[in-house]
Image: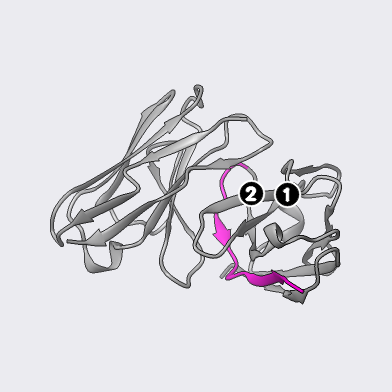
Amino acid sequence: QVQLVESGGGVVQPGGSLRLSCAASGFTFSNYGMHWVRQAPGKGLEWVAFIWHDGSNQYYADSVKGRFTISRDNSKNTLYLQMSSLSAEDTAVYSCAKGRDTMTYWGQGTLVTVSS
Amino acid sequence: EIVMTQSPATLSVSPGERATLSCRASQSVSSNLAWYQQKPGQAPRLLIYGASTRATGIPARFSGSGSGTEFTLTISSLQSEDFAVYYCQQYNNWPPWTFGQGTKMEIK
């Protein structure tokens, strides 16, 4: 069965950096585009970034463009999100999701808290 | 960017009743519309794609309709496990992929 397990979250100071990982199993990872989606406490879903199955193209929400970088290692079945210049507005649960048009499976997410 | 607007924000329904949730797009998204269900502390689950096609394993009491800018998710007879937050999402014009703000289904 499809499994997506995020890790790397934690508490970081404003202006700091963090790298999130998403370990995928149960499907051929290299065949699928992948998203990062975040959810601030008590709020709705916000799309963050997408990467093509082969890593050839990446897309970002305006709110994170220039600060976040999505990448993947298909040999390790792992998706990444490098986050920098973090602010309180980036505090959220970050989840990875499989698919391009629709997000067919989601991980449970990892909490990122930006606070001094 | 296509803005998705859901209504109502909260829907109070009794178990066994029918529930109708609405989603409106700021411009046409054709039938490129998905619905997700999210229960507290859980990851979202894909319910409907293509505006009306149920995802794998989704019970027949969930149905979607609409095209263009107006969409509806109907739950024919609410079960206790259906009380959750529901989101619509368009994938007609990306990036960005955009979600509605959600409708919370609560027990009346």
Q: Nearer the viewer, residue A1 or B104?
A: B104
Instruction: Write down the chain letter for disc 2.
Output: A
Cβ–Cβ under 8 Å for marks 1 and 2: yes
Q: Quadrant of the C terminus of chain B?
A: bottom left
Q: Nearer the viewer, residue B65 or A29?
A: B65
Name the disc covering residue A49, or none: 1
- The answer to whether residue A77 is magenta is no
Q: CA distance from mark 1 to mark 2?
A: 6 Å
Region rendered in magenta: A101-116
Q: Residue A12: image x %, image y %?
A: 79, 73
Q: Nearer the viewer, residue B36 or A40?
A: A40
- The answer to whether residue A113 is magenta is yes
Which of the 4 quarters of the picture holds residue B70?
top left
Residue at x 76% of width, y 60% of height: A87
Asked whether residue A88 appears in the rendered view, the answer is yes
Q: Is the residue marked by circle 2 packed among few (<14), some (14-19), or many (20+) residues within 10 Å? A: many
- Height in image: A77 above or below B69? below
Q: Quadrant of the N terminus of chain B?
A: top right
Amino acid identity at mark 1: Ala
Residue marked by disc 2: A47
Residue at x 49% of width, y 26% of height: B26
Asked whether residue A33 appears in the rendered view, the answer is no
- Height in image: A75 above or below B19? below
Amino acid identity at mark 2: Trp
Tag count: 2
Q: Helix, strand, or loop for circle 2? A: strand
Q: Residue A49: image x %, image y %?
A: 73, 49
Residue at x 49% of width, y 22% of height: B28
Name the disc covering residue B38, or none: none
Q: Helix, strand, or loop for circle 1? A: strand
Which of the 4 quarters of the picture holds residue B64?
top left
